[in-house]
Amino acid sequence: MTLKCNLQEIYAAAHSPNGEMVADPTGRYVYSKNAGWGIFWSWIYKIANFLGIDDFAKNCFERAMVHTHRLFSEQLSKVIESCESYETNLKKRYLGEKICEKENAAHRQRISQWYRNVAPFIRYVKEGPSASLTRIVSTSFADEFCQKYKVPLSEGSYSTLIKRQRRIIKLEGILKLNMPVNLLIKASKKSPLCRSEKESLKKFVRKINDDQQNIGVRTLHHALLNVIQRAKKFSFDVPGAIQPDITTLEMELLKIDCPVILQKDPKHMAKRNFKSGDSVVCNHRLLKIGERLGTVHEGDQNVVFTTDDPNVAVVIGINAVLHPLKRMLAYSEGWGIQSAEYIDIDHKTGVALVERLYDHLGSFKWTSNSNLINSVDEDVAMPLWRLLRWFVEKNSTPLNFSPKYLMFDRRGILKCLKVTTKGELDFNSLVKFADETSSGNPHIFRYLMQKSELIGHKYAKFYEDILKYAIKNEEESVQNIATSRGIIDHRIIGRGKEFEKEVLNLKERCMKQIKPERLLADPKVFEQKVSEQLLTSYLNSAAAGLLPDNLEKEIIAKVNLKNRLKV
């Protein structure tokens, strides 16, 4: 405790206005002169000076500083010994060899304690000692000022090793178990794991999940990263072999189910507060920040900024792990539509550079007012219906496929802001996409549905059958209709049941919006006319399993026109 207390006092004094210090008469403890015991001993030394005891305060302080230095050196020597032993044990663990857990725990505790007690002061020294600190230390160590940090309290070449080991030790301390480093290295290279190894790795991930509130993504990432770095240093692999990779490892843990990797990192997210004119560095490339694109919402994973390079945007995620994972996902599993290309990622800072996309699909204004689509609209609509048709042909729908994520690059190529991966065919989502993309323009919607051939799909015919039975008040279960069409997709059948209710409600609303006194003499004839118009309008809209927003008004208007009635 003496070393920790003395370093804290030196740190405090170096940050005080005058930076003066005193020691106790035993020459063991140092204190800031203007606080606590420092005030008391200052008065004692004034009395000593008055009594003619010269240099008493100075001699006590020099002895205390020498004592502090000796404690530092002694404890550093022990920590270095523990570091070397821990490193040896770590190497054995990589090879799957057994180690003495009790001995390893003692080394781990010593390294951790050293880091807690000394690291804050060491970081302060490395940042560049202040004039106050230089004055304090020069009192006792003038001959050692030629050292790198001008302070004789340095871990030397072991500084980085202690820091890296501490990051592994920190996670192991929270989990209260050793990391399965040999399995993690295998996973980082996608090496095959036997059944027991897979279960051990899953057990490790479950333990992380249980303690995720105490761990956080930063602690986990730093520990995993240093496991990878130590493995590379040990050079187990033969030349040309696949090297362990941190992003591959984190992707494998994510597949097992490790949501900690997707947590927000408050320290990293603080970097998202850029202002126009600020500078940002990504792997030694310096860029000027421009405007922030879009409005930032609480749940957003990314904040995007323009830069002084018109082809490059800066993206800051919720943690430093996210973008390397997204880039890997895009390369290995991307499907359906090309995502915005990553130009560079700084793995240390988490800053990502991506290609700048410009025109958002949702911002395009359709101008066609008839079934004859004009050339401007067709240029935008053509890649959309071709994409939809291709999805139907491949019997698949990409995940994350939504108009709000689609933008055009500088060459006019449609790209997605999110990585899209292959999923099962989701017919309903494709129809919804056509509906949302058309932005209420019935001509564009019809064009997309027809050209993509969605309207000719068996699922579209299934919904058409449901509507026909519903408007005729004929009792036929949706399940029976599905069976007759050979449909087993529960999403389609579930939507069919909802669609049946929506059709009946629409018909009822249309009937009610005709004034009773203007009805035809025979209510059944009138109901038949409404049903016929509902079917005609639905088929003309080229919809499939949804009722367009303008359908109700169209039905009422046309029934009124045919019967010369006015609402």
Image (spheres, helix red, strand yellow):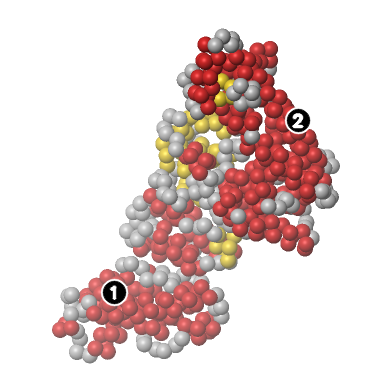
Secondary structure type for disc 2: helix
- Residue at left 55%, top 38%? 351
Secondary structure type for disc 1: helix
Dividing the picture into quadrants, the one containing residue 489 is bottom right
Q: Position of residue 459 (x, y in %)?
A: 50, 74
Q: Earlier in the sequence, mark 2 or mark 1?
A: 2
Q: Position of residue 323 (x, y in %)?
A: 57, 45
Q: Nearer the viewer, residue 259 or 424?
A: 259
Q: Nearer the viewer, residue 6 or 322?
A: 6
Q: Position of residue 360 (x, y in %)?
A: 43, 48
Q: Tell me which amino acid carries mark 1.
A: Ile
- Residue at left 51%, top 24%? 40
| Residue 336, numbered circle | none
Instruction: Work out how far the residue at label 2 is from the one at label 1, CA to CA, in angstroms.
Output: 89 Å
Dividing the picture into quadrants, the one containing residue 245 is top right
Q: Tell me which amino acid carries mark 2.
A: Ser
Q: Is residue 412 visible?
A: no
According to the picture, the residue beneath numbered tag 1 turns out to be: 555
- Quarter of the picture holding the C terminus: bottom left
- Residue at left 65%, top 59%? 206
Q: Is residue 247 above or below residue 71?
A: below
For marks 2 and 1, give the one nearer the viewer. 2
Q: Is residue 551 above or below residue 389?
A: below
Q: Nearer the viewer, residue 255 or 564?
A: 255
Q: Is residue 215 left or right of residue 447?
A: right
- Quarter of the picture holding the N terminus: top right
According to the picture, the residue beneath numbered tag 2 turns out to be: 77
Label 1 packing within 10 angstroms: few (<14), some (14-19), many (20+): many
